[in-house]
Structures are given as structure tokens and as C-alpha cells.
Amino acid sequence: MVAHVATVAYLGLEAKPVDAQVQVAPGQTGVTLVGLPDKAVRESRDRVAAAFAAIGLSLPPKRVTINLAPADLAKEGSHYDLPIALALLGAMGVVDAETLGSYVVVGELGLDGRVAPSPGVLLAAMHAAGRGLGLICPAAQASEAAWLASGSGGIEVIGAPDLLALIHHLQGVRALPAPEAAALSESGFRGPDLAEVKGQEIPKRALEIAAAGGHNLLMSGPPGAGKSMLAACLPGILPPLSTAEALEVAMIASMAGTLDGTRIARHRPFRAPHHSASMPALVGGGAKAKPGEVSLAHLGVLFLDELPEFAAGVLDSLRQPLERGEVVVARAAAHVTYPARVQLIAAMNPCRCGHLSDAALACARAPRCAGEYQAKLSGPLLDRIDLHIEVQAVSAADLSLPPPAEDSAMVAARVAAARALQRARYGDAARCNAEADGKLLEEAAAPDDAGRRLLTQAAEAMKLSARGYHRTLRVARTLADLQGAETVGRAHIAEALSFRRQRPVN
């Protein structure tokens, strides 16, 4: 007899169907596992045997063959433990094999029989809903699966705390409680309030523009000027994720194994990797092609502090994701695509010592120090950043002033109003001005005659690339949205041009 249990293999953010087949036949005692398994999957034999022993069962003294079909699809991860165990139980006649055919199964087994969490349950739930099947998964992750199932036709979700309890449920001895769907949570990383930032009116204005249009921002200034604090204020003024966007973010977190199973967050991700991060850590990849920081920050903020300290190759690997909004990880066996629609916020010192413009602490190697330091950033990367600002050091007089009257909530209200205009304008074609392109941008951001003349003159004088030209239009459209103006005017073009990159020090 051959028992079948449906499970999945993860390829990026896609769940491919896998059929876990188990045959128990006469012959030399032993367990054979085939189907292109990796080391973690091959070790399933030992974990399943130990889990059986923990609940008083033993493997049959026959030849056991386990096949994970299709055989030409690589199988990776520990989530095959539970489907293999259930298929084996079906072949042994402990549970009804026909009943098992109604579920997609994922989960890792402990040696004591407990079912441990495994990455990708949310993707497995989507796959099960698409096939009209139920889902058996670890109890710790059943809430996230139930949340998705509640919007996908109400598929059955069984959260298994351990193998014995699951067997009793499938045999009808003792039913497991139905999991409660995870709730959408507004709480999360917010950072400091803009009311805590004294002075820095121009950087705060640039931060508001960046939030309103989803634009990339680079802050340059001396150490201690407040660049990191300003970046940390951004999540507090960004609008929350919609339900559909929260699902996109949750899918990536589920694949990375970082999703909180009890709640689905509506706050936008904020990722701040250290400058020693490798290329696979930042853009994704590695032996198992996992998502990187740029994908974990999808629909949120990727903050790169001390930008020139990152390896040049690592920074240049961001060029494609920033332009296309996705990362393609190429491997010999397959190409994996992860979404990476991020808002890049970067900070840097003007030179290595950071005191280029301070007469009292002037660098002895200026301007060569600044030139060498800034030259670590490639022109194509800088061209993809919409807003470039200088953050000046905060004086003692500014620090002694009372807190600003305007806090993050006030700025967030203006940002939300601007984003609402963009949603109404673009519909499903784009989420914000930073995503508008081609004909969509030409129609939405067409300036008046005075604005067009200024932009044309500035493009020639500043040697703007085609990308720089269009990014200036996007920023100008955001400025008009913040003002509530229907048409992009000369003033909007002028302010947008003031944020374009200045030429590096020679």
C-alpha cells in the first residue's frame, strides 16, 4: 500500500506542490528516502523514528520507501517531517489514508513528538486555499494560517501541538481546538517623535516629502547631527499597511521565519543592517536563496547608516532592486524572485572624520579626504536617490529651545492626505508617486509651462540623466500633493531641483 500526503516546496514566495509518498512492503528492514532531498530532509528519517518512539510506536519491520515527488524538484527544510510521519502512519493503518488526502501538511518534528514551527506556513496556507484543501501545521503558527484562511474561503486549519494529539484528532478520539485567527496589529516599531528633533527644519521637510511620495533619501552631515534619529522618525509618519500589503509583508516574514504567529503587523517594516552586511544578507541569496534585508523591508524602510562603509559591490547590488522593486536570485537549478519595493533612507558623513565643514575641527586631509570617501558611492546608485540633503550640526542654542510645536502625528496627517490623493490618482497602477513611471508619470506630473521651462533649463545645466529628470518630476508631484495642488508648478519644480545631488568634492 502507498499512502499519499500533500505538502509543498518553497521556491521564493511560491509554494510548489509536493506529494509525500510512503510504501511499506516486505523486504529487508530499513528506510529509504528519495526525491532529491537536502541534508535536513534526509535527517527526517531519524526525527520521525524518534517521535514515533516517544509516543509508543515503532517503525514496521519491513522495507519503508519514502518518495517526495516530483523527483526533479529540490526539497529543502525541515517542514517535511510531519507530512512524512503522517504518510507513514497512513501506510501503517494508524490513521485513515483517505482523510489525509484532504490536507496540505507542513511542520517539523521534535524527538519528543512535539510539532515545532517551520518557515513558510503562510505560503503553505495560500497554496492549500488555492487547491481547496485544509492545512495541518504547527500549533504555534496556526493563528497566521487561520488569518489567511478566513479571507480565502474559510479552509480548515488544524494546529498540531504534538504528533499524538494530531493522531487522536484524525482518529476522532479527541478533537483539537480550532485556532483563532491572528489579529491585524497597529503596534510596532515607531521610533522617536519628530517633536523630539530640535532644529533641522530642512531635513524634517525632506523627511515629510520622502514619506508622502515614497522617495529615497540621502542625508549627509557631521557625526551627532541627528541623521539616525531623523531616519528613526520616519516609521511614525508613514501610513499603515493596507490588508493586502500586510499580507505581502507577512509572506516574506513567514518565509524568513520571523513572523509573529499571533498577530499580523500593519506597521511598515524598518530594517537597519550593519555596514558589514554581505551581499546575500542585503539582497538575498546564499545556499538556499533566502530573502535579504531589502526584501524583508518590502513596502517599508531600508535604512543604511554610514553608507560609504558598506562594500562597494554590496551597494551596487541594490541598483536593480531600487529600480525594479524586486530581487532576482539566480541559481543553477532555478531563478527565485523576491519583492523589494523599499524606501531607501541612507546617512553618511561628508568625509571619513566627519568634520569637513567645521573650521574648528577641520580635516587635515581636506578636500582629498572627502573626495576619496564620497567616491566610494557610485554615480548610478546616487542617481536612484531622489532627495539629497545636508544635515548641519545642531548648536547648543537649538538644544536649549523648547520642543517644536509640530509632532509626528501632525506630519503623518499631511502624509496620509497626500497618499490618499495618489491612491485615487493611480488606482492599482502604482501605490505612490515613487512608483509612477512612463505614461502614468507623464500624465500625473506634467508641469505647467513655467515649470517645464525651468526643468528643461535645469536638466541641461545640472546634466541630469533621464532617470534624474523623471525622479525630479516625481518629487515635484509629491510637493504638489502635499500642497493639494492639481498641477505641478514652477515652485514645485524648483524645490524638487534643490534636493537633487550636488557634485562631489574634487
Image (spheres, rainbow, N blue to C red):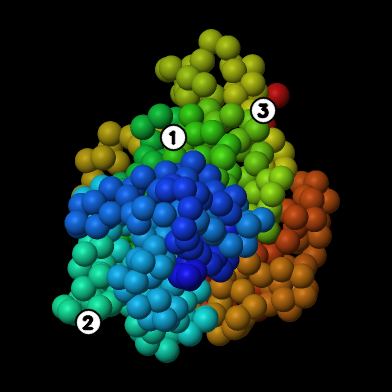
Q: Where residue 133 appears, x then y in whole percent?
A: 45, 81
Q: Amino acid at mark 3?
A: Ala
N-terminal label among 3 and 2: 2
Residue 375: mark? 3
Position of residue 440 measured from the top left corner of the image (x, y, whole percent): 72, 76
Q: Quadrant of the C terminus?
A: top right
Q: Give the camera-side residue of 171 and 409.
A: 171
Indicate the secondary structure of the residue bearing disc 1: loop
Mark 2 closeness class: few <14, some 14–19, many ≥20 residues within 10 Å: few
Q: Residues within 10 Å of mark 3 (few under 14, many from 20)?
A: some
Q: Is residue 151 visible to the viewer in this orientation of the structure? A: no
Q: Is residue 346 left or right of residue 192?
A: right
Give the amino acid at mark 1: His
Q: Quadrant of residue 146?
A: bottom left
Tell us which disc is closer to us: 1 or 3. 1
Query: What residue did someone put label 1 on?
Result: 274
User: Left or right of 7: which side holds 440?
Assistant: right
